[in-house]
Image (cartoon, rainbow, N blue to C red):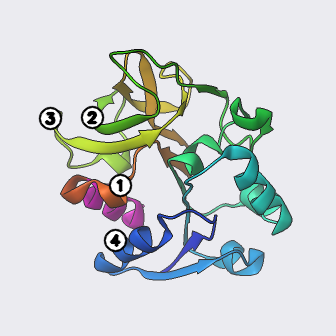
Amino acid sequence: MSTVVIDSGGANLASLSYALQRLGADVTVTLDPAVIAQAERVLLPGVGAAGAAMQRLNAAGLVPVLREIKKPLLGICLGMQLLFEHSAEDDTVTLGLLSGQVERLPASPELPAPHMGWNTLQTLRADPLLEGLQATDRVYFVHGYFAAGHLPDVVATSDYGRSIAAVVRRGHIAGVQFHPERSGAVGATILRNFLKS
Protein backbone atom coordinates (compact mmCIF):
# COMPACT_ATOMS: atom_id res chain seq x y z
CA MET A 1 0.00 0.00 0.00
CA SER A 2 1.46 3.39 -1.01
CA THR A 3 1.47 5.97 1.79
CA VAL A 4 2.38 9.56 1.00
CA VAL A 5 3.42 12.20 3.52
CA ILE A 6 3.02 15.65 1.99
CA ASP A 7 6.24 17.63 2.26
CA SER A 8 4.67 20.56 4.08
CA GLY A 9 8.05 21.82 5.26
CA GLY A 10 7.55 20.95 8.93
CA ALA A 11 10.16 19.60 11.28
CA ASN A 12 8.09 16.50 12.05
CA LEU A 13 8.37 14.93 8.57
CA ALA A 14 11.21 12.56 9.50
CA SER A 15 9.68 11.41 12.79
CA LEU A 16 6.28 10.87 11.16
CA SER A 17 7.80 8.92 8.28
CA TYR A 18 9.79 6.77 10.70
CA ALA A 19 6.70 6.08 12.83
CA LEU A 20 4.81 4.93 9.72
CA GLN A 21 7.71 2.79 8.49
CA ARG A 22 7.84 1.03 11.87
CA LEU A 23 4.23 0.03 11.22
CA GLY A 24 5.19 -1.48 7.85
CA ALA A 25 4.09 1.38 5.59
CA ASP A 26 5.87 2.10 2.31
CA VAL A 27 6.32 5.87 2.78
CA THR A 28 7.09 8.57 0.21
CA VAL A 29 7.57 12.23 1.24
CA THR A 30 6.67 14.47 -1.69
CA LEU A 31 4.99 17.59 -3.03
CA ASP A 32 4.34 15.97 -6.44
CA PRO A 33 0.60 16.28 -7.21
CA ALA A 34 0.61 13.18 -9.46
CA VAL A 35 2.18 10.97 -6.77
CA ILE A 36 -0.20 12.31 -4.11
CA ALA A 37 -3.25 11.80 -6.34
CA GLN A 38 -2.29 8.12 -6.90
CA ALA A 39 -1.49 7.27 -3.25
CA GLU A 40 -3.60 4.84 -1.24
CA ARG A 41 -3.17 6.89 1.96
CA VAL A 42 -2.18 10.57 2.31
CA LEU A 43 -0.98 12.39 5.42
CA LEU A 44 -0.82 16.17 5.68
CA PRO A 45 1.46 17.07 8.60
CA GLY A 46 2.17 20.61 9.66
CA VAL A 47 4.42 22.53 12.00
CA GLY A 48 4.53 26.30 11.62
CA ALA A 49 2.10 28.95 10.41
CA ALA A 50 -1.10 28.48 8.42
CA GLY A 51 -0.31 31.22 5.90
CA ALA A 52 3.09 29.81 4.95
CA ALA A 53 1.71 26.26 4.80
CA MET A 54 -1.09 27.25 2.42
CA GLN A 55 1.38 29.21 0.26
CA ARG A 56 3.51 26.06 -0.01
CA LEU A 57 0.49 23.92 -0.96
CA ASN A 58 -0.70 26.51 -3.50
CA ALA A 59 2.76 26.88 -5.05
CA ALA A 60 2.95 23.11 -5.52
CA GLY A 61 -0.51 22.99 -7.14
CA LEU A 62 -1.81 20.77 -4.34
CA VAL A 63 -4.90 22.67 -3.21
CA PRO A 64 -7.18 21.33 -6.00
CA VAL A 65 -5.67 17.84 -5.57
CA LEU A 66 -6.45 17.81 -1.84
CA ARG A 67 -9.95 19.17 -2.42
CA GLU A 68 -10.68 16.34 -4.89
CA ILE A 69 -8.87 13.48 -3.17
CA LYS A 70 -10.95 10.31 -2.70
CA LYS A 71 -8.52 8.17 -0.68
CA PRO A 72 -8.08 8.43 3.11
CA LEU A 73 -6.44 11.72 4.12
CA LEU A 74 -5.17 12.47 7.64
CA GLY A 75 -4.23 15.99 8.71
CA ILE A 76 -1.88 16.24 11.69
CA CYS A 77 -1.59 19.29 13.99
CA LEU A 78 -1.47 22.31 11.63
CA GLY A 79 -2.42 19.86 8.88
CA MET A 80 -5.71 19.21 10.70
CA GLN A 81 -6.34 22.94 11.01
CA LEU A 82 -5.80 23.38 7.27
CA LEU A 83 -8.75 21.03 6.64
CA PHE A 84 -11.16 23.72 7.90
CA GLU A 85 -12.42 26.77 6.00
CA HIS A 86 -10.37 29.57 7.56
CA SER A 87 -7.62 30.14 10.13
CA ALA A 88 -7.24 33.26 12.23
CA GLU A 89 -3.50 32.66 11.92
CA ASP A 90 -2.36 35.06 9.19
CA ASP A 91 -6.09 35.46 8.27
CA THR A 92 -5.72 32.44 5.99
CA VAL A 93 -8.28 30.81 3.70
CA THR A 94 -7.64 27.09 4.14
CA LEU A 95 -8.77 23.94 2.30
CA GLY A 96 -12.47 24.00 3.20
CA LEU A 97 -12.81 20.22 3.50
CA LEU A 98 -14.44 20.56 6.94
CA SER A 99 -16.90 23.19 8.20
CA GLY A 100 -15.64 25.75 10.69
CA GLN A 101 -12.95 28.22 11.62
CA VAL A 102 -9.64 27.90 13.45
CA GLU A 103 -9.14 30.45 16.23
CA ARG A 104 -6.22 31.70 18.31
CA LEU A 105 -5.85 29.84 21.61
CA PRO A 106 -6.15 32.43 24.40
CA ALA A 107 -3.41 32.39 27.03
CA SER A 108 -3.89 32.62 30.78
CA PRO A 109 -1.52 32.27 33.76
CA GLU A 110 -2.85 28.75 34.41
CA LEU A 111 -3.04 27.72 30.75
CA PRO A 112 -0.25 29.22 28.64
CA ALA A 113 -0.39 29.33 24.86
CA PRO A 114 0.80 27.50 22.89
CA HIS A 115 -0.64 24.43 24.52
CA MET A 116 2.21 21.95 24.97
CA GLY A 117 1.74 18.68 26.81
CA TRP A 118 -0.11 15.43 27.29
CA ASN A 119 -3.92 15.30 27.41
CA THR A 120 -6.65 12.70 27.34
CA LEU A 121 -9.34 12.49 24.66
CA GLN A 122 -13.10 12.63 25.21
CA THR A 123 -14.78 10.56 22.50
CA LEU A 124 -18.03 12.04 21.18
CA ARG A 125 -18.73 9.21 18.74
CA ALA A 126 -16.99 6.04 17.64
CA ASP A 127 -14.38 6.44 14.93
CA PRO A 128 -11.98 3.95 13.27
CA LEU A 129 -8.97 6.11 14.26
CA LEU A 130 -9.82 5.65 17.96
CA GLU A 131 -10.31 1.89 17.87
CA GLY A 132 -8.49 0.20 20.76
CA LEU A 133 -7.93 3.39 22.79
CA GLN A 134 -8.81 3.71 26.48
CA ALA A 135 -10.33 6.75 28.22
CA THR A 136 -7.13 7.21 30.24
CA ASP A 137 -4.81 7.23 27.18
CA ARG A 138 -2.89 10.46 26.61
CA VAL A 139 -1.57 12.08 23.45
CA TYR A 140 0.91 14.91 22.93
CA PHE A 141 -0.22 18.38 21.83
CA VAL A 142 1.76 21.41 20.62
CA HIS A 143 -0.46 24.17 19.16
CA GLY A 144 -1.34 27.84 19.51
CA TYR A 145 -4.54 27.74 17.42
CA PHE A 146 -7.56 25.46 17.72
CA ALA A 147 -10.89 24.43 16.26
CA ALA A 148 -13.76 24.43 18.74
CA GLY A 149 -14.97 21.12 20.12
CA HIS A 150 -18.61 21.79 19.15
CA LEU A 151 -18.02 21.86 15.38
CA PRO A 152 -20.02 19.29 13.37
CA ASP A 153 -17.13 17.07 12.22
CA VAL A 154 -15.50 16.66 15.66
CA VAL A 155 -15.38 13.04 16.90
CA ALA A 156 -13.17 13.59 19.98
CA THR A 157 -12.24 16.61 22.06
CA SER A 158 -9.62 17.51 24.62
CA ASP A 159 -9.94 20.03 27.43
CA TYR A 160 -7.57 22.98 27.70
CA GLY A 161 -9.66 25.53 29.54
CA ARG A 162 -12.22 24.98 26.78
CA SER A 163 -13.30 22.12 24.55
CA ILE A 164 -10.92 21.83 21.60
CA ALA A 165 -11.27 19.59 18.56
CA ALA A 166 -8.78 16.75 18.97
CA VAL A 167 -10.00 14.32 16.29
CA VAL A 168 -12.18 15.26 13.30
CA ARG A 169 -13.77 13.26 10.51
CA ARG A 170 -15.93 13.75 7.44
CA GLY A 171 -16.01 10.60 5.35
CA HIS A 172 -12.50 9.78 4.15
CA ILE A 173 -11.11 13.10 5.50
CA ALA A 174 -9.80 12.95 9.07
CA GLY A 175 -7.50 14.95 11.29
CA VAL A 176 -5.84 14.98 14.70
CA GLN A 177 -4.74 18.13 16.53
CA PHE A 178 -2.05 16.26 18.46
CA HIS A 179 1.14 14.57 17.23
CA PRO A 180 0.63 10.78 16.98
CA GLU A 181 4.30 10.34 16.01
CA ARG A 182 5.23 11.82 19.40
CA SER A 183 2.53 10.04 21.42
CA GLY A 184 4.19 6.67 22.03
CA ALA A 185 2.12 3.48 21.81
CA VAL A 186 -1.18 5.40 21.74
CA GLY A 187 -0.05 7.42 18.72
CA ALA A 188 1.19 4.26 17.01
CA THR A 189 -2.26 2.71 17.48
CA ILE A 190 -3.89 5.74 15.85
CA LEU A 191 -1.49 5.64 12.88
CA ARG A 192 -2.00 1.88 12.53
CA ASN A 193 -5.77 2.45 12.50
CA PHE A 194 -5.34 5.03 9.74
CA LEU A 195 -3.23 2.65 7.67
CA LYS A 196 -6.02 0.03 7.99
CA SER A 197 -8.80 2.50 7.07
**Residue toward you, 160 or 170:** 160
Q: Secondary structure at mark 3?
A: loop
- Identified at 85% across, 65% down, the residue is 59
State the residue at coordinates (55%, 54%).
47
Q: What residue sits 39% from the left and 52% below the top?
A: 179
- Which sits in the foreground, 30 or 174? 30
| Rendered image quadrant of residue 36 | bottom right
- Residue on which the image places disc 2: 119
Q: Nearer the viewer, residue 79 or 153?
A: 79
The circle drawn on residue 19 is: 4
Please state the horizontal and vertical placement of residue 87, each as a whole percent of the image.
70, 33
Mark 4 and mark 1 in contact (Cβ < 8 Å)? yes
Q: What segment carries the magenta color?
A: 187-197
Real-space Cα separation, disc 1 to disc 4, in angstroms: 9 Å
Query: What residue does disc 3 label?
Result: 136
Label 4: how many Cα within 10 Å (few below 14, some 14–19, many 20+): many
Q: What x and y, as percent, mark residue 118?
A: 26, 39
The three-letter code of the residue at mark 1 reads Pro
Q: How many marks?
A: 4
Q: CA distance from mark 3 to mark 1?
A: 16 Å
Q: Residue at x 60, y 25 (%)?
A: 104
User: Badges 3 and 4: C-beta atoms under 8 Å apart?
Assistant: no
Looking at the image, is mark 2 or mark 3 earlier in the sequence?
2
